[in-house]
Amino acid sequence: MPDSLLVDLSRLQFALTAMYHFLFVPLTLGLSILIAMMETVYVMTRRKIWRDMTKFWGVLFGINFALGVATGITMEFQFGMNWAYYSHYVGDVFGAPLAIEGLMAFFLEATFVGLFFFGWDKLKPVTHLAVTWLMALGTNFSALWILIANGWMQNPVGAEFNPETMRMEVTDFVAVMLNPIAQAKFVHTVSAGYVTGAAFVLGVSAFYLLRGQYQALAKRSFAIASAFGLASALSVVVLGDESGYSLTDHQKMKLASIEGMWHTEDAPASFTAIGIPDMEARETHYAIEIPWVMGLIGTRSIDETIPGIFDLVDRAEGHIRNGLLAYDALEEIKAGADDRTTRARFDHAQGDLGYALLLKRYVDDPRTANDDQIRQAAWDTVPGVPSLFFSFRVMVLIGFFFILLFALAVWHTAKEADLPKWLLRAAVLAIPLPWIGVEVGWFVAEFGRQPWVIEGVLPTFLAASNLTITDIVITIAGFTLIYGVLAVIEVKLMLHAIRKGPDQIVNDPSSALPGFGTPSGTAEDASKPVPAE
């Protein structure tokens, strides 16, 4: 079993690279749809302003997309570098959607990105529009497959453990694809990406409007971003509620930890709006509760109970004891006693085998564990309640803030020619908030399933590679340095392109890169139609 410090450092490295990579993903998702919508208006109206909008926001999309691909490549290699036993144990299941995601990202998506940038003067407007929409769809389908892979880690359906190969193997790939956790995560994650893209366009457009620059482009961009953003923010809340509902069936401990619910309440359960969870005292201090809300959200009923942490720990202890039966039968099978009776004993209890593996933190042979060790292993299934409790509430507050911001933007866009400066300033200041929301959301999703790397199947501490601590420290330092440089490059390129402005970027996209391109004239009149190419 890997050293606990080695496991923690491996988790830290993966968290740093994953959360860094996800700085680029949501903006890619959101901008791809927005520029497809802008080009659709251009093709329908032939007004040059809409083509200029598509090109300008497309350049910012391209900068972000390039950095996203560069940082995403690292993610797939880490499974083999730092999580070798994980890759061996579940590679037959996890590898398929990951491979399809790679094909989507590096062949389908990248191909259409190239056609989008280099096909303006070579393709007919309708053909180029089709390319843009296929680029947007390819981006979203790329996200679908990685979320199917991640959803299987949260809810491992369509696969079972094979005692002959000592690996998890696919039994129903359709079930893997249609995993309810994966589908809920996909629509929720994509909607959050749409909010990020809309908030970015809204904020940059507001920046131009405050400075009195590029009014025609900025006003139209502000309007389309506010409408798209409002629809997306509302869907994030609705689909987030659906994600919470799916936890009731598949990840009860995560749900109880998010709510700081230590004891099972009479149905319908209250929602703890605020409080201070205490892991040592195992209670939530100063809780302010809203009656019925948690029961209605979590069960869609008024008579179904939501189990608390203490009850779930008792259930985990039962799973551990049952898993010991599977572990004992598996050891006999490995020793050669693969008769019908032994196989039947294993098949009957194999669903809880992963729980027995939790005991390897305390003893080499789980069958030798005493009652205290079994109870401690059961309590190990409780993640860090305070971290989840507060992170979830930050995410929810950000979600409702954007509903308010986009609603105000839509209202003032519809009724006023000049937008109030306080609204424009709020839009500029809100640009970082979507990234905070999505990063916190991923923290809740991933930290909430600890101690499992595969829920109920494989504990995280067993999944890591047998590397040295020096190896991990060096790679963490290397990734931090390289990603720090890439972050500076990303921000510099984005700010450079925004300062250059649409007039220069549209007529010479290479001017978005410092040192390339030359200043060019102003864009043509916004109302002037462009003849078909």
Image (cartoon, rainbow, N blue to C red):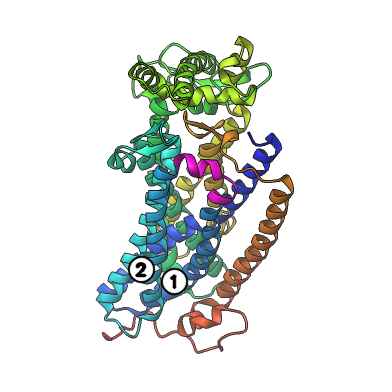
Residue 174 appears at what percent x and percent y?
A: 28, 42
Q: Which residues are magenta?
A: 79-90
* Placement of the C terminus among the 4 image quadrants: bottom left
Q: Examine the structure image and report whether residue 351 is included in the region drawn in magenta.
A: no
Q: Taking 406 as reference, is 272 above or below it?
A: above
Q: Residue at x 37, y 46 (%)?
A: 187
- In this orientation, which residue lies closer to the viewer: 300 or 174? 174
Name the amino acid, label 1. Answer: Gly
In this view of the protein, can residue 106 be seen by the observer? yes
Q: Quadrant of the N terminus?
A: top right
The residue beneath circle 2 is 38
In this view, the residue in front, 65 or 416, is 65
Q: Residues within 10 Å of mark 1 (few under 14, many from 20)?
A: many
Q: Residue at x 49, y 75 (%)?
A: 214
Asked whether disc 1 touches disc 2, contact meaning CB atoms under 8 Å apart, the reply is no
Question: Does the magenta-highlighted stretch encompass residue 88?
Answer: yes
Query: Furthest-front residue in view?
Result: 336
Pick the front one: 517 or 349: 349
Circle number at residue 58: 1
